[in-house]
Amino acid sequence: MPTGFERGTDGPKVIVVGVDGSESSWRAAAYAAGLARRQNAMLAIVYVQPVLVGGAAFGAPVAEVTEEVAEELLAEIRATTERLRGLYPHAMRWEFHTFRGDPYSGLVQAADDLKADAVVVGASEQAGHRIVGSVAVRLVKAGRWPVTVVP
């Protein structure tokens, strides 16, 4: 029997969900929030800031653009949490994390660093991912955590 970190013995303690502002990622976040609330688990909401070659997007430095996206996501999460505060008897525990890199590597790093028991992601909305593989498919194939893909 392996020693060290043990996952899933008493239900999830940490659930990682990837958000990028897409409709499917918000659905994944809602699903993960419900799961975390019912399981009394920590919800780690993760935005992976892309690192783009070229240094600028639409005239603004890429780092500034991705920081703005992260701030907007966090503001939306806080607003939603505030709206739901009176509906549930106990407050759900959540944290917002940002990582840099491609979405797959960022979510893997987040899940490893946060010792995730489960990972939740939205289904890809890009047609090309049916051919080359989506982040969700790559996470499932990694076989390191239970992965839930929300349509």
Image (cartoon, rainbow, N blue to C red):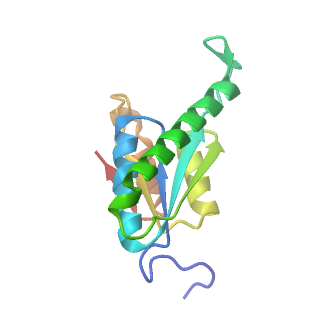
What is the residue that sits farthest to the top in this orientation? 59
Residue extending farthest to the left is 151
The residue most toward the front is: 86
Position of residue 69 in the picture relative to residue 9 (left or right): right
**Could you say where residue 83 lies in the image, as x and y percent from the top left?**
39, 49
147 on left or right of 53: left
Q: Residue at x 35, y 70 (%)?
A: 38
Q: Of residues 7 and 31, which is closer to you in this image?
A: 31
Q: Would residue 55 be seen by someone viewing this image from the given angle?
A: yes
Q: Is residue 19 visible?
A: no
User: Whole-percent x and y of residue 21?
Assistant: 45, 35
The tally of labels here is 0
Q: Is residue 102 left or right of residue 26?
A: right
Q: In the figure, 128 relative to 13: above or below?
A: above
131 left or right of 42 in image? left
Q: Position of residue 81 (x, y in %)?
A: 44, 52
x, y percentage for residue 27? 33, 46
* Up/down of 79 relative to 66, above or below: below
Residue 64 or residue 119, whichever sits in front: 64
Q: Quadrant of the N terminus?
A: bottom right
**In this view, 88 is above or below 4:** above
Residue drawn at (58%, 41%) of the image: 48
Residue at left 38%, top 54%? 84
Vertical relation: 112 (above or below) 122: below
What residue lies at 56% left-to-right and 32% top-to-bottom? 69
- Location of the C terminus by quadrant is top left
5 or 11, nearer to the observer? 11
